[in-house]
Amino acid sequence: MAFNDFSAPPEARNQVIIHYCNLCRWMLRAAWMQQELLSTFPDELDRVSLQPGSGGVFAIWLDDTLVWERQRDGGFPEAKVLKQRIRDQLSPERDLGHSDR
């Protein structure tokens, strides 16, 4: 596909979905995490999507792998921990700088 061919969406290979509870008003938290991931992995991630839900859900998926789940993992992830978990799936050899210390 040519760079300026807008007739079809680009193929996505590494996709993150942040599924958050809209009723709990967690959209801003989800959007902040989305921005953190896009800033940290600009070349590795093709898409980071927000998916509203209900029932207290807050789960983060990388492709078919559940990276974080609020109830299972005991709350919300710190940005550092989330970046490490995403990195461990995408490119384990990559150094995250201050996020690894």
Image (cartoon, grey):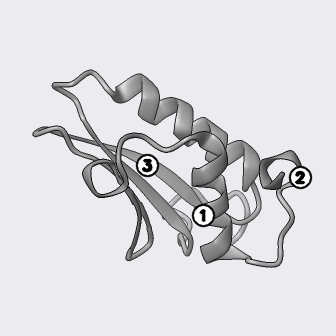
Contact (CB < 8 A) between labels 1 and 2? no
Q: Nearer the viewer, residue 59 or 16?
A: 59
**Measured from the top left, where is residue 34 in percent x and y?**
54, 41
Name the residue tied to disc 1: 86
N-term mark: 1 or 3: 3
Q: Nearer the viewer, residue 41 or 8?
A: 41
**Measured from the top left, where is residue 59 in percent x and y?**
33, 52
**Measured from the top left, where is residue 61 in percent x and y?**
40, 63
N-term mark: 1 or 2: 1
Name the residue tied to disc 2: 97
Contact (CB < 8 A) between labels 3 and 2? no
At horizontal 43% and vertical 49% (from top left) the residue drawn is 49
N-term mark: 3 or 2: 3
Pick the quarter of the image with the N terminus.
bottom right
At horizontal 60% and vertical 75% (from top left) the residue drawn is 89
SS for tag 3?
A: strand
Numbered disc total: 3
Q: Is residue 100 above or below residue 12?
A: above
Q: Would you say 23 lies left or right of 78 here?
A: left
**Measured from the top left, where is residue 18 in percent x and y?**
39, 49
Circle 1 packing at 10 Å, graded few (<14), some (14-19), many (20+), is: many
Question: Label 3 amino acid?
Answer: Ser
Name the residue tied to disc 3: 49
Q: Would you say 89 lies left or right of 70 here?
A: right
Quadrant for residue 100, please give it: bottom right
Q: Is residue 68 above or below residue 94?
A: above
Of circles 1 and 3, the one toward us is 1
Question: Label 2 amino acid?
Answer: Gly
Of circles 3 and 2, the one toward us is 2
